[in-house]
Amino acid sequence: MAIEKIVLKTQKMECTGCKTCATDYAAENLRHALARLNGVSKVKVDEVTGKVTIEYDSQKISYSKFTERLVRLGYRVEIESRGIP
């Protein structure tokens, strides 16, 4: 098992980035959409900043699957950091 950690900065595509938008963020939906991917061990979503932290087994899943899933859900995604937890 090769556990890695990635931090993504997300923003809803139609969002202006205001705090009101961020709190209506549907964090639980994001958490659920990512946590059910095979190889994901932990997902944390910060509703205010839009940061999504994911711990995963890099032998089972590529980090690109996370960005692909979030884009399909209507989010703009940037990789903030990546490495070993």
Image (cartoon, grey):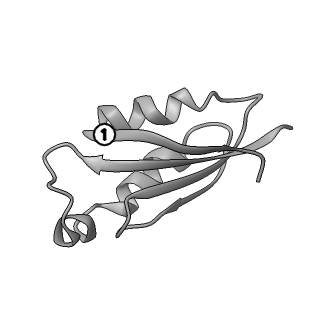
Name the residue at 53% across, 27% down. 64
Residue 32's place in the image compared with 48, above or below, is: above
Residue nearest the observer in this picture, 8 or 36: 8
Residue 83's place in the image compared with 17, above or below, is: above
Name the residue at 22% across, 67% down. 24
Q: Quadrant of residue 47?
A: bottom left
Left or right, 48 with respect to 53, comes to left
Q: Quadrant of the C terminus?
A: bottom right
Q: Quadrant of residue 42?
A: bottom right
Left or right, 12 with respect to 61, comes to left
Q: Given the image, on which type of amino acid does mark 1 rest? A: Arg
Q: Residue furthest right?
A: 1
Residue nearest the observer in this picture, 6 or 62: 6
Residue 20 placement (x, y as % from top left): 17, 72
Left or right, 70 with respect to 14, comes to right
Name the residue at 29% across, 42% down. 75
Name the residue at 73% across, 32% down. 58
- Where disc 1 sits, the SS reads strand
Q: Quadrant of the N terminus?
A: top right
Residue 32 placement (x, y as % from top left): 45, 53
Residue 25's place in the image compared with 82, above or below, is: below
Residue nearest the observer in this picture, 8 or 65: 8
